[in-house]
C-alpha cells in the first residue's frame, strides 16, 4: 500500500479535471481536493478494470446517495466518449462537458424570460433597504395592500406587493432573531469552569453554569403549485426566503402531480430562473395528488426532518387521491417533524369550510391550520414559526 | 481487479463478513489514502460491522465513538477527572503551595481522562480504527468539531498543549440519515452507500452467520424479507432482523416457512405495531405465496 504522492501523469490529472467539470455541470459540488484524491485513488486500483475505476471514483467523488444517479450518467458518458480508443484511462482527452439535457441541476438555457406574472429579481438586494420603520407599511395605500388577497391584485401591482412582502419579512427577521437570544439562568453546571474559579477555596462554593444553545429551527416547505395555488406559493416562498437567516435551513419542494425539490434552484442568482421553473411544473390538467407526493417526500426526503423541523404545507386540499393515503402520510410526517403547519389560502374567504375529503382527513394531524392569502396572514404565520 | 481489493474481500469473508466489490474497494481506498470513509445506508445493513472487520483485517484496535444528541466536544475528546481533582484540592488545602503549583498539579496527565478521539490520536500501538458511529445523531456543533479534528488529526488541550497523532487513525463514520450531514463533512470523506443486499448475497450472509440452518429455510427467509422490503412499512427491516429471525426459527427447529410460523415470529422482523398489523392482514388475505414468489 503506497500513499506516495508521486506526480500523476499529466493527462490523467487533466482528464480528472474535465470529469470534475462534467460532474459539477450535473450538480455534484466536487472539490479540487476530491479530484486530487481521485487521481491518487486511480493509482491504487487497476486502471484497466472498468469496475475498479468506477467504484473508486464513485467512492471519492460522490458524497451522498442522491448523487449516485448523476454520477453514473456522467461516468457512462465520460467512458463511452472514449471507448473507441481502447480500454484504459490513459488516453483520456478533454471530453465534452456539455450540460446534460433537461437535468434538474443543469444550467438553464439562456433566453429572455418575460416578466409575465411577478418579478422577484433583486429581491435580496431590495430587502437590504430598511428605510422606513414598518410595523405596518407606512402609507395608507400600503395598508390596504396588507389585507388584500394576493389573487385579486392586478398584474402591474404584483411587483410592489412583492417588495412589500420582503420588507415585512426582513423586519420580522430582526425581531425573531432578537427573541431567541438565550437569557436563561440555569442550564447545566460547567464543572470545568467551576473548578477553576474555586481553586483557592478548597471546595466548590460558586457554581459556574452554561446554557445549552438553542438549535435553529429548520423549515421544510411543501408548496402546491397546481392551478391557482401557484401565486400563493410564490408569495409564501418569497416571504420565507427573506426570513431565512432566522432558520437553520430552508428546504423547498413543489408539487402538483409530482414532487420536485427546488432548494438548490432557489439558491442565489438563479432565483428568477427558479420561479420560472415553478411555473413550468404547474399543472392544470388533473387536480393535485397530495397523498402521493407526500409519500414520495417521506420516502426520499424524510431524513431532512427531525424534531427541530417545521413542515409548512401550502395547498387548498383538493386531493384527487384516497383520503386514507393522505392521512397515513400526514401521520408519518407528524411523527418525524417538530411541527406541521397547513396553509390554505381559501381560509381567507370567511365562508370557506375545509370539507373536501382530503382536507378533512388531514386536518386532525395538523398542528396549525391557517390562511396565507394576504400579507397580514403571512405576518401572523411568522409568529408560529417556533417550536415552543 | 486490483490484487489488494481482492485480498481485502477475502480477508473480510474470512472474518465472517459477506461483502461485495463496492465495499472492498472503498475500504481499500480508505486504508491506502488514509481518508475517512463515510458509510450510509438503512439501519441494519452492516455499516458498523465494516469498521469492526477493518480493525480485524488491519490487526489493530477499534475505538468507538457513539454519537447522540447533546454529545459535546469535551465528551468525545478528554475530560478532567473532577472528583479526583476535588480530592486533591482538599488534600492540598493545608499546604502552602502556590496557586500555580496547585493548578499545574491537578491539570496534568494523571488527572486526564481520555475519551475516544484522544485515544485514537494517541494509541498504544499501531494506528487504530476509529469508528464514529451514527454521526447523524450528534449535533451540528459536534459535526463541525469532528471536521476540524479529522482534517489535521491534532487537538489542543489548553492546559497541556497541542497533541498531534503520530500516525492518523483509520476513520469510519456511519450515518442512518436521520439528519442531513453538512457538505463540508461529506466532501472530506470517501463515501459508500450500503444498500440492502441482493438475494444471493443475503442468502450467503444467512447461511454464514446462522449455523445449522438448512438451505431451504435460508432461501425462503431471504425471499420473504425481499418482498417485505417492498411493502410500505414504517420501519423497513434490515439484515440484522433477517439474522435475528433466522436464528429464532432455527431454535424453533423449523425447516421451512409457513403462514402460522411467520405470524408467530413476525416480531423478530417488524418493530412497529402498525407494520405488524398490516403484514398480518396481507398474510391472511394473500397467503404465503405472495411473499415467497420469485419476483420477475
Image (tube, coloured by chain):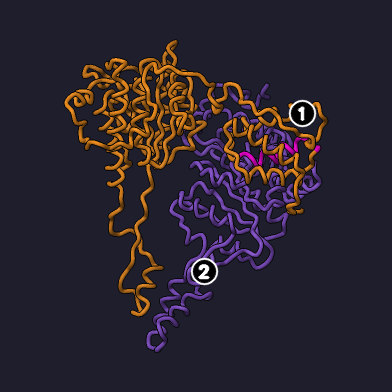
Chain colours: A orange, B purple
Q: Secondary structure at mark 1?
A: loop
Closest to the observer, B142 or A74: A74
In this picture, residue A143 sits left or right of residue A332? left
Q: Residue at x 54, y 21 (%)?
A: A109
- Magenta residues (range): A48-62
Coordinates of residue A319 in the picture (x, y in percent): 40, 18
Q: Output the chain of dot 2.
A: B
Which quadrant of the rendered structure holds the C terminus of chain B? top right
Closest to the observer, A290 or A50: A50
Q: Quadrant of residue A101?
A: top right
Coordinates of residue B17 in the picture (x, y in percent): 70, 47
From this viewpoint, is residue B20 visible? Answer: no
In this picture, residue A156 sits left or right of residue B271? left
Coordinates of residue A360 in the picture (x, y in percent): 33, 22
For the residues bearing labels 2 and 1, Cβ distance under 8 angstroms: no
User: In the image, which disc is placed on residue B113?
Assistant: 2
Closest to the observer, B148 or A120: A120
Q: Which residue is farthest top?
A: A285
Q: Residues within 10 Å of mark 2 (few under 14, many from 20)?
A: some
Q: Residue at x 78, y 48 (%)?
A: B4
Residue A278: in magenta span:
no
Q: Which residue is mark 1?
A: A82
Q: Residues within 10 Å of mark 1 (few under 14, many from 20)?
A: some
Q: Quadrant of residue B258?
A: top right
Q: Main secondary structure of the magenta part?
A: helix
Amino acid at each position: 500500500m503506497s500513499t506516495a504522492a508521486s506526480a500523476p501523469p499529466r493527462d490523467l490529472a487533466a482528464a480528472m479535471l474535465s470529469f470534475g467539470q462534467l460532474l459539477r455541470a450535473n450538480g455534484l459540488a466536487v472539490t479540487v481536493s476530491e479530484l486530487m484524491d481521485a487521481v491518487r485513488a486511480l493509482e491504487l486500483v487497476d486502471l484497466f478494470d472498468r469496475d475498479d475505476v468506477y467504484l473508486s471514483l464513485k467512492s471519492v467523488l460522490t458524497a451522498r446517495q442522491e448523487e449516485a444517479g448523476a454520477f453514473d450518467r456522467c461516468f457512462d458518458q465520460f467512458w463511452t466518449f472514449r471507448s473507441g480508443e481502447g480500454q484504459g484511462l490513459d488516453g483520456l482527452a478533454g471530453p465534452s462537458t456539455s450540460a446534460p439535457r433537461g437535468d434538474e441541476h443543469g444550467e438553464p438555457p439562456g433566453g429572455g424570460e418575460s416578466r409575465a406574472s411577478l418579478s422577484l429579481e433583486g429581491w435580496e438586494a431590495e430587502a437590504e433597504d430598511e428605510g422606513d420603520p414598518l410595523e405596518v407599511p407606512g402609507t395608507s395605500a400600503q395598508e390596504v395592500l396588507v389585507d388584500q388577497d394576493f389573487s385579486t391584485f392586478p398584474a402591474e401591482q404584483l411587483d410592489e406587493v412583492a417588495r412589500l412582502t420582503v420588507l415585512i419579512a426582513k423586519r420580522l427577521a430582526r425581531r425573531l432573531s432578537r427573541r431567541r437570544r438565550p437569557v436563561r439562568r440555569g442550564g447545566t453546571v460547567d464543572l470545568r469552569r467551576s473548578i477553576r474559579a474555586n481553586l483557592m477555596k478548597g471546595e466548590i462554593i460558586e457554581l459556574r453554569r452554561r446554557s445549552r444553545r438553542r438549535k435553529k429551527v429548520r423549515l421544510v416547505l411543501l408548496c402546491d403549485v397546481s392551478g391557482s395555488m401557484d401565486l400563493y406559493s410564490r408569495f409564501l416562498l418569497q416571504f420565507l426566503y427573506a426570513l431565512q437567516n432566522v432558520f437553520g435551513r430552508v428546504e423547498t419542494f413543489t408539487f402538483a402531480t409530482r414532487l420536485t425539490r427546488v432548494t438548490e434552484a432557489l439558491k442565489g442568482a438563479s432565483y428568477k430562473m427558479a420561479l420560472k421553473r415553478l411555473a413550468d411544473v404547474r399543472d392544470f390538467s388533473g387536480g393535485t395528488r397530495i397523498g402521493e407526493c407526500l409519500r414520495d417526500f417521506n420516502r426520499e426526503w424524510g431524513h431532512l426532518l427531525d424534531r427541530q423541523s417545521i413542515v409548512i404545507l401550502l395547498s387548498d386540499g383538493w386531493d384527487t387521491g384516497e383520503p386514507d393515503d393522505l392521512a397515513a402520510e400526514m401521520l408519518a410526517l407528524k411523527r418525524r417533524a417538530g411541527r406541521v403547519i397547513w396553509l390554505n389560502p381559501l381560509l381567507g374567504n370567511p365562508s370557506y369550510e375545509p370539507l373536501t375529503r382530503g382536507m378533512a382527513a388531514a386536518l386532525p394531524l395538523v398542528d396549525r391550520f391557517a390562511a396565507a392569502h394576504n400579507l397580514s396572514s403571512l405576518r401572523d404565520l411568522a409568529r408560529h414559526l417556533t417550536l415552543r | 481487479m486490483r490484487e489488494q481489493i481482492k485480498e481485502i474481500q477475502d480477508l473480510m469473508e474470512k472474518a465472517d463478513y459477506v461483502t461485495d466489490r463496492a465495499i472492498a474497494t472503498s475500504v481499500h481506498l480508505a486504508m491506502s489514502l488514509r481518508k475517512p470513509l463515510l458509510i450510509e445506508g438503512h439501519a441494519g445493513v452492516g455499516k458498523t460491522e465494516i469498521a469492526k472487520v477493518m480493525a480485524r483485517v488491519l490487526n489493530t484496535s477499534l475505538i468507538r465513538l457513539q454519537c447522540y444528541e447533546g454529545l459535546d466536544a469535551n465528551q468525545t475528546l478528554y475530560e478532567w477527572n473532577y472528583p479526583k481533582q476535588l480530592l486533591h484540592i482538599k488534600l492540598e488545602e493545608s499546604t502552602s503551595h502556590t496557586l500555580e503549583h496547585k493548578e499545574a498539579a491537578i491539570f496534568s496527565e494523571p488527572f486526564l481522562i481520555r475519551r475516544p478521539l484522544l485515544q485514537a490520536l494517541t494509541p498504544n500501538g499501531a494506528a487504530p480504527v476509529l469508528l464514529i458511529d451514527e454521526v447523524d445523531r450528534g449535533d451540528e456543533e459536534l459535526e463541525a468539531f469532528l471536521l476540524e479534528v479529522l482534517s489535521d488529526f491534532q487537538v489542543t488541550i489548553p492546559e497541556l498543549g497541542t497533541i498531534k497523532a503520530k500516525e492518523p487513525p483509520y476513520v469510519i463514520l456511519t450515518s442512518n440519515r436521520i439528519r442531513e450531514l453538512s457538505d463540508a463533512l461529506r466532501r472530506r470523506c470517501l463515501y459508500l452507500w450500503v444498500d440492502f443486499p441482493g438475494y444471493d448475497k443475503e442468502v450467503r450472509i444467512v447461511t454464514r452467520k446462522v449455523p445449522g440452518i438448512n438451505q431451504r429455510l435460508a432461501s425462503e427467509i431471504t425471499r420473504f424479507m425481499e418482498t417485505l422490503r417492498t411493502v410500505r412499512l414504517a420501519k423497513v427491516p434490515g439484515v440484522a432482523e433477517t439474522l435475528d429471525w433466522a436464528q429464532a426459527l432455527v431454535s424453533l427447529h423449523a425447516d421451512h416457512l409457513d403462514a402460522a410460523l411467520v405470524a408467530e415470529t413476525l416480531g423478530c422482523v417488524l418493530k412497529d405495531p402498525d407494520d405488524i398489523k398490516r403484514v398480518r392482514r396481507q398474510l391472511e388475505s394473500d397467503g404465503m405465496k405472495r411473499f415467497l414468489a420469485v419476483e420477475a
